[in-house]
């Protein structure tokens, strides 16, 4: 039961990070290949605080969330002000992630490439509570005026700008919100695994987050969150298949792209399906 619980908890942690990327990619329309960097910032900020200064976990989690959100300004202000297209922005934020990884591997406070051992503080209550809070805050935020502006930018940036929408500020806000959610995910991850290492936050993790958003459906919260859970749990469920479990994981993603190119719940939410059936 401990093993199954750990898998479920890790899936919930990934759901928070995917939720953040869904705000930025699914609703604002910009692709990112570097959101694992924000997960790493949240993980190391909270981990360093609890390891070196015995900061209570609540404040460490809050600090990790805030640090990730604020760090997004470092890459967001120069790139978004320059109005980089989606593919160029993805490359720029990828470079930011790789630069961060090199810094983490060479800082003494992070224990370098050897990693940092922290206390296991994020129990099921912390993880599930943070996930529910993140879902509620994100849902209300996207249903507000800001969500409508994000969608307008995603659909036609030129028309949105002509209508008076400040593309730079709205995209920067979207990036900051998504980074903060990834930071919260990283803080929970660090104190669930009780160990963090720079190699955990690379392009591979960013690609997995992006795959969950695309497979779950652009313009949806429910879809990416559901797919994130499946993509985390499925490789573990198929562990008995040994070397074939990863190809099975890839095959599932390919089948979704072929038969559901709009994603699992593209532009819809899970409650909409039940209303339609009724």
Image (cartoon, rainbow, N blue to C red):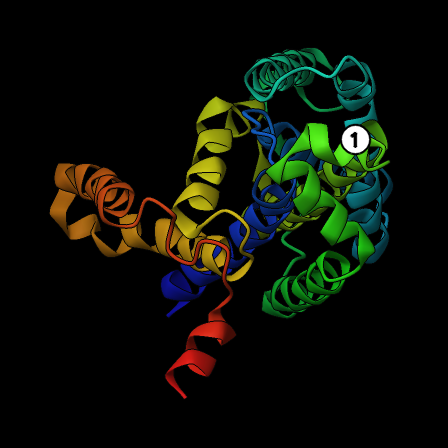
Q: Residue furthest bottom?
A: 278
Residue under label 1: 161
Query: Residue 70 is drawn in which quadrant?
Result: top right
Q: Residue at x 69, y 43 (%)?
A: 152
Q: Residues within 10 Å of mark 1 (few under 14, many from 20)?
A: some
Q: Is residue 30 above or below residue 141?
A: above
Residue 33 showing in the rendered view: yes
**Residue 7 appears at what percent x and percent y?**
41, 57
Foreground pick, 276 / 164: 164
Q: Quadrant of the C terminus?
A: bottom left
Residue 41 showing in the rendered view: no
Q: Residue at x 87, y 40 (%)?
A: 53
**Residue 221 appears at what percent x and percent y?**
56, 57
Q: Quadrant of the N terminus?
A: bottom left
Foreground pick, 147 / 52: 147
**Horizontal side, residue 94 vs residue 164: left or right:** left
**Horizontal side, residue 213 vs residue 22: left or right:** left
Q: Residue at x 71, y 66 (%)?
A: 133
Q: How many marks?
A: 1
Q: Is residue 120 above or below residue 74?
A: below
**Horizontal side, residue 27 vs residue 5: left or right:** right
Q: Is residue 197 above or below residue 262?
A: above
**Horizontal side, residue 91 vs residue 256: left or right:** right
**Residue 224 appears at what percent x and percent y?**
48, 52
User: Secondary structure beneath disc 1?
Assistant: helix
Query: Residue 258 is drawn in which quadrant?
Result: top left
Q: Residue at x 61, y 67 (%)?
A: 128
Foreground pick, 145 / 184: 145
**Residue 240 appears at what percent x and percent y?**
15, 51
């Amino acid at each position: 039961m401990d093993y199954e619980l750990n898998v479920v908890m890790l899936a919930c942690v990934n759901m928070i990070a995917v939720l953040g990327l869904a705000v930025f990619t699914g609703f604002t329309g910009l692709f990112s290949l570097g959101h694992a960097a924000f997960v790493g910032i949240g993980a190391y900020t909270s981990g360093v605080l609890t390891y070196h200064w015995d900061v209570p976990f609540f404040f460490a989690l809050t600090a990790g969330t805030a640090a990730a959100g604020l760090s997004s300004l470092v890459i967001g202000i120069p790139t978004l002000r320059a109005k980089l297209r989606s593919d160029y922005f993805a490359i720029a934020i990828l470079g930011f992630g790789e630069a961060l990884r090199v810094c983490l591997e060479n800082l003494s406070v992070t224990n370098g490439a050897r990693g940092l051992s922290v206390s296991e503080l994020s129990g099921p209550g912390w993880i599930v509570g943070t996930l529910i809070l993140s879902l509620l805050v994100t849902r209300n935020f996207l249903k507000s005026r800001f969500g409508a502006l994000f969608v307008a930018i995603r659909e036609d940036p030129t028309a949105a700008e002509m209508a008076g929408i400040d593309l730079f500020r709205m995209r920067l806000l979207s990036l900051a919100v998504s980074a903060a959610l990834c930071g919260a995910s990283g803080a929970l991850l660090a104190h669930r695994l009780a160990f963090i290492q720079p190699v955990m936050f690379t392009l591979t993790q960013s690609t997995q987050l992006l795959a969950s958003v695309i497979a779950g459906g652009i313009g949806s919260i429910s879809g990416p969150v559901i797919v994130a859970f499946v993509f985390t749990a499925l490789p573990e469920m198929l562990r008995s298949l040994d070397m074939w479990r990863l190809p099975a994981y890839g095959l599932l993603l390919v089948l979704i792209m072929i038969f559901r190119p709009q994603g699992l719940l593209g532009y819809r939410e899970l409650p909409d399906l039940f209303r339609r059936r009724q």
